[in-house]
Image (spheres, rainbow, N blue to C red):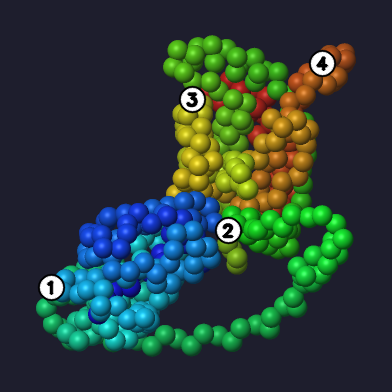
């Protein structure tokens, strides 16, 4: 029976996506690894590869279709000896159409093979972990009495496909031990007021000229995550001014020397480096909230907010404390460019313990940023502005001052620790030469 190609989960949190573009058409012959389509997730547009070889017999979901749920059949693949006449109006849906685990890679392919009869439930190994196999592979394994735990998969990320089980020798199937009963869940908390309904808001402005703007996946995700962040994270805020004159002078000198290499350092590059080093100097602040515990990180993985049309990304600069200013500058420019083109892979914008949001280039003096869970803190950076200040000698002078605010998750970082962390950031920025030591 023809095989269904399913809507893939291209990131650990993806529940639905937009089928932006088909890269094949009905009648095309494809092989494992060939590109089938471009899929838009809530964060990026990514390419989707074929798992098996065959002929595209029918496309079930048209280009531009939005809100396509993960594991929904999007096309039908014909194998040797099959034709379009074998396609029924309602192709059998794989029984184990479930979302892949959190460790699924961004280019993971769909569950290619569809069985002609219901496939056995997703198998588990002796330690209770799930074994990833296509529905057809599971059905053939059951028919041949094969233990999937003993078969090495050749599909994407070790997934067991039809060819793996067809070439395996029959052996008694090991039955997984029944899973322990889950404990009864605690009573659900009372739902918070959701605010006026869409219909109520529309009626409120019925006599005014309006334009209804449909939310795309990114905007829906931003709305959900920031609502969650403000409702569940106990924020507190630490503010201070940082003098920039030494940094600006040092930056000018470095840029003059780096001009021949086409490298131009920004103030933000210095801020990234300063924060990365501060995370090493105050390691207890280099932590995230993990539900019922904290995770303390050893590397300085710094996320930096990048504004794009309709939303933002926070690409992560890994091991930022170990990289030179010029390396950080080059990497940040590349990440920002690909973020604006929505070409980042999930592993490039997920992770980190801390983030930077800089609105100084827009003339914003200061603001409070919302923590991006599970991060422990985020630094909001304002513009460098010339202000009258009292110098060390007690005389009034003029200095370039930048206002910053550290938003802190009180579950992860207490007040004194947050103050120590922010002090370390400020000292690095005000003494930029120390960052090269």
Q: Secondary structure at mark 4?
A: strand
Q: Circle 3 — which element?
A: helix
Does residue 155 lie above or below 129 as drawn?
above
Q: Quadrant of the N terminus?
A: bottom left
What residue is shown with label 1? 167
Give the camera-side residue of 294 and 20. Answer: 20
* Coordinates of residue 192 in the picture (x, y in percent): 77, 72
Q: Between disc 3 and disc 2, whose residue precedes? A: 2
Q: Going from the N terminus, do you reach mark 1 or mark 2 first?
A: 1
In the picture of the structure, the residue carrying the numbered disc 3 is 326
Query: Residue at the location (16% across, 71% down)?
Result: 80
The residue carrying pointer 4 sits among few (fewer than 14), some (14 to 19) or many (20 or more) residues within 10 Å by Cα, namely few
Say left or right for 194 vs 151.
right
Q: Say whether disc 4 or disc 2 marks the residue closer to the N-terminus.
A: 2
Q: Which label sits on residue 398?
A: 4
Q: Is tag 1's residue or tag 3's residue first in the polypeptide sequence?
A: 1
Q: Residue tagged by mark 2?
A: 217
């Amino acid at each position: 029976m023809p095989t269904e190609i399913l809507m893939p989960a291209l990131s650990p949190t993806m529940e639905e996506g937009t089928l932006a573009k088909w890269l094949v058409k009905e009648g095309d012959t494809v092989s494992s690894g060939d590109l089938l389509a471009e899929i838009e997730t809530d964060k990026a547009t990514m390419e989707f590869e074929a798992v098996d070889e065959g002929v595209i017999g029918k496309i079930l979901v048209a280009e531009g279709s939005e809100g396509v749920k993960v594991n929904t059949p999007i096309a039908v693949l014909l194998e040797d000896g099959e034709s379009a006449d074998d396609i029924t109006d309602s192709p059998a849906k794989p029984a184990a159409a479930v979302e892949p685990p959190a460790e699924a890679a961004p280019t993971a392919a769909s569950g290619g093979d569809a069985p002609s009869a219901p496939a056995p439930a997703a198998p588990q190994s002796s330690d209770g972990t799930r074994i990833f196999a296509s529905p057809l592979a599971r059905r053939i394994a059951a028919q041949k009495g094969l233990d999937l735990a003993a078969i090495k998969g050749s599909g994407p990320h070790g997934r067991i496909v039809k060819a793996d089980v067809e070439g395996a020798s029959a052996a008694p199937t090991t039955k997984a031990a029944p899973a322990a009963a889950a404990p009864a869940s605690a009573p659900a908390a009372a739902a918070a007021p959701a605010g006026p309904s869409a219909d109520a808001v529309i009626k409120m402005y019925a006599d005014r000229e309006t334009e209804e703007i449909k939310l795309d996946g990114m905007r829906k995700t931003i709305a959900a995550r920031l609502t969650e962040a403000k409702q569940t994270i106990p924020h507190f805020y630490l503010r201070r001014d940082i003098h920039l004159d030494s940094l600006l002078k040092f930056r000018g000198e470095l840029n003059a020397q780096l001009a021949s290499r086409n490298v131009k350092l920004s103030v933000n590059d210095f801020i990234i480096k300063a924060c990365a080093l501060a995370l090493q100097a105050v390691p207890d602040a280099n932590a995230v909230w993990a539900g019922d515990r904290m995770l303390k990180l050893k590397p300085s993985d710094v996320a930096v907010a990048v504004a794009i049309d309709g939303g933002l990304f926070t690409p992560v600069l890994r091991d930022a404390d170990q990289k030179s200013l010029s390396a950080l500058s080059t990497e940040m420019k590349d990440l920002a460019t690909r973020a604006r083109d929505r070409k980042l892979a999930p592993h490039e914008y997920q992770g980190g313990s801390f983030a930077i949001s800089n609105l100084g280039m827009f003339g914003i003096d200061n603001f409070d940023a919302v923590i991006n869970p599970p991060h422990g803190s985020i630094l909001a950076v304002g513009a460098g502005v010339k202000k009258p200040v009292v110098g060390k000698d007690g005389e009034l002078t003029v200095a370039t001052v930048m206002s910053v605010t550290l938003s802190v998750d009180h579950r992860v970082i207490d007040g004194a620790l947050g103050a120590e962390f922010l002090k370390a950031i400020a000292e690095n920025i005000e003494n930029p030469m120390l960052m090269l030591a």
